[in-house]
Image (cartoon, rainbow, N blue to C red):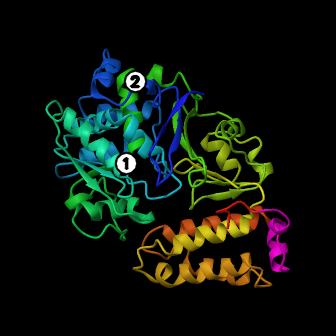
Amino acid sequence: MSGVRVAAGQGTDVWVHEGPRLLADLEHGPGLAVHRRRSNGRQPWPTSGWELAELLEAVDLRGRGGAAFPLARKVRTAAKARGRPVVVVNAAEGEPASSKDSTLMLLKPHLVLDGAQLVAQAIGADTIHVVVPGERPSVQAGVRTAMADRADADPVPMSLHRAECRFVAGESSAVLELLSGRPNLPVTTSRPSAVSGLGGRPTVLSNAETYAQAALLARDGVDAYCSVGTPAEPGTRLLTIDGDGDRPTVLEVAHGTRLAPLLAAADADADNGLLLGGYHGTWLPPAAVADLTVSAMSMIEAGAAIGAGVMLPLRAGACPIRRTAVVVGYLAGESANRCGPCKFGLPALAHAVRDLALGAVRSSERIVQLMDAVERRGACHHPDGTTRSIRSMLRAFPLEVEMHLSGSCTAAAVAVPAGAW
């Protein structure tokens, strides 16, 4: 695979491989003139929210931010809701292990902005807000340049916003809080943002890749969009592999592609296990990864979800219990700190998992009790995502857990790479 290296990570360059759609023709750069030449001859854009929703439904285009919510449903809801709609591009990407949206905003910003304009014009929105990660200044600079280059031609004005440098900053309610001038932290919401979002107005909020996918679909048409992928899941998606490791890699792959060769292309493997879906994801043992494909059904059968497309292979010689303890410790410090489960439950849970990692306990009962106490009780889903990774660790590596309960560890016999603990 050919590709480029970009400064899309947090202090570490990201290797980006050429892809079939979103990441095609990387050698031509991110400029507007090149983008417009490639977009010549595009299909006419839908002229209403209903027409756009039908186009999106034809390929079942779902959000690429983690929840996989149908974009057509957001568009349809916002189009019929009371009030002037707003469009929000969420490229905050708060998780350190994810770089796909940042990469897209650096290398293909106009594809993302086209998608935002497409949605805004179809539903009659008068404003587009673009949110970028605060810890990645190169992304902010690149998007600002792209927005300035096209400002005179875009019918819907766009504004740029910088999210805070924290894990929960990209959560949808936290993004709306930021745009409202309040702290960039998640809050409890009772109504979907497509009904009542920013300032009480109907708001279509989705991540950068989702808007880029919508732009491709509108530009090329349904048949071209479905020419890659599977009949059940047409199209492609972006993946970040080893995003917090020594060689973070971003790939664009067709749905249905086997996972193992993708890991090999990124100089990684799943011989020791895989954390799928990022820090809020699911641990899978090596045997569960062997036949896994990049598809929702394959992931469901494995008891996991692709989430935001983050894949973290366990390094050779590293311990999954210790790795989980590091992740949970980080997550406990990244909460909104506004409700009991986050303020008290997650720190206690982090201590309990660390004790297990250190072989300082003889039972995992305390961990299970704490997980039961915080799940589905927080103001946001941060506690639920944290417990998901812990429960899957206990399930995927029972022998390793037993060793730690007896005061030993398989990693003790080998040299553990720097950063593995």
Say whether residue 304 is left or right of residue 406.
left
Residue at left offset 37%, top offset 71%: 188
Helix, strand or loop for the magenta stretch, by majority = helix
Instruction: Identify the mark at residue 28; answer none if there is no mark.
Output: 2
Q: Answer whether residue 384 is magenta in the image.
A: no
Which residue does the image show at 38% across and 34% down from the upper left? 108
Q: CA distance from mark 1 to mark 2?
A: 27 Å
Q: Quadrant of the N terminus?
A: top right
Query: Quadrant where the C terminus lies?
Result: bottom right
| Residue position marked by numbered label 1 in the rendering | 206
Residue at horizontal 71%, vertical 65%? Answer: 393
* Closer to us: 414 or 100: 414
Q: Are marks 1 and 2 in contact (CB under 8 Å)?
A: no
Q: Secondary structure at mark 2?
A: helix
Q: Amino acid at mark 2?
A: His
Percent of width and height locating residue 396: 76, 61
